[in-house]
Amino acid sequence: MNQQYPSLLLQKAVDEFSKLPGIGKKTAMRLVLHLLRQETSEVDAFGKAIVQLKHEVKYCKVCHNISDTDLCQICANPSRDSSTICVVESIQDVMAVEATQQFHGLYHVLGGVISPMDGIGPSDLQIDSLVDRVSKGDVKEVILALSSTMEGDTTNFYIYRKLADSSVKISVIARGISIGDELEYTDEVTLGRSIVNRTIFTGNI
């Protein structure tokens, strides 16, 4: 056992917490000691929630958003505009766009962007399922709402080429978002305006 820790159980807990993104050893220690100060029932509820999340959470069979059922609440909502699909990189981006209250269509979560440097190609993303959704003929517009990075622009262009033979309108969010910005960290007002003021995508990157 590391002499720094008075307990092997404490060390193991700190090691596990420090595996989380953005959590160093000091922060992990604070979190673990905080849990130790809580009632046993509260810690049990915390642990149960994490385990239950991992074992029971689903991904929507249509848009690939996180869901408690096979069809997420957004896709199952009859008041949403099913003719418009907003394509995003991640589940966090769905939440960011929803927070603007400026978009009332459906989503499609790619699960990332094309990044050869990271070994991520088109086949690693949910692009084919997007093409399948569009091919059914009910979709009139696809909004490309990916981060304004080189990887995001490359993915936009790839999707544009894949949908070139369809009659669907392809637009891209307005560049109110700075180059290189991640969508989930953009403020709600800027992101909302970027969606409302979207422009036709011309295939340029």
Image: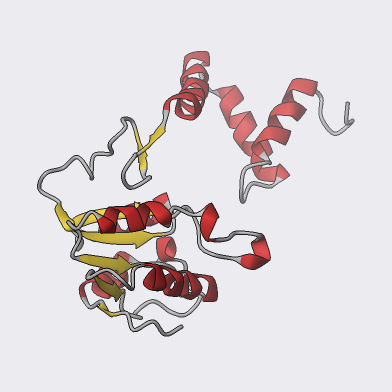
Residue at 81%, 24% in the rendered image: 6
Residue 7 point in image, percent of width and height:
79, 22
Residue 64 point in image, percent of width and height:
38, 45
Say which of 109 and 26 sits in front: 109
Find residue 127 and report its image quarter: bottom left
The reply, left or right, for residue 64 in relation to residue 143 is: right
Q: Is residue 51 above or below residue 86?
A: above
Residue at 60%, 35% in the rendered image: 31
Q: Decide if residue 98 is in sight here.
A: no
Residue at 34%, 61% in the rendered image: 87
Q: Is residue 157 above or below residue 42?
A: below
Image color mode: secondary structure
Residue 143 point in image, percent of width and height:
29, 67
Q: Decide if residue 170 is in sight here.
A: yes
The reply, left or right, for residue 4 in relation to residue 198 is: right
Question: Quarter holding the N terminus?
Answer: top right
Find residue 62 and report its image quarter: top left
Residue at 34%, 80% in the rendered image: 176
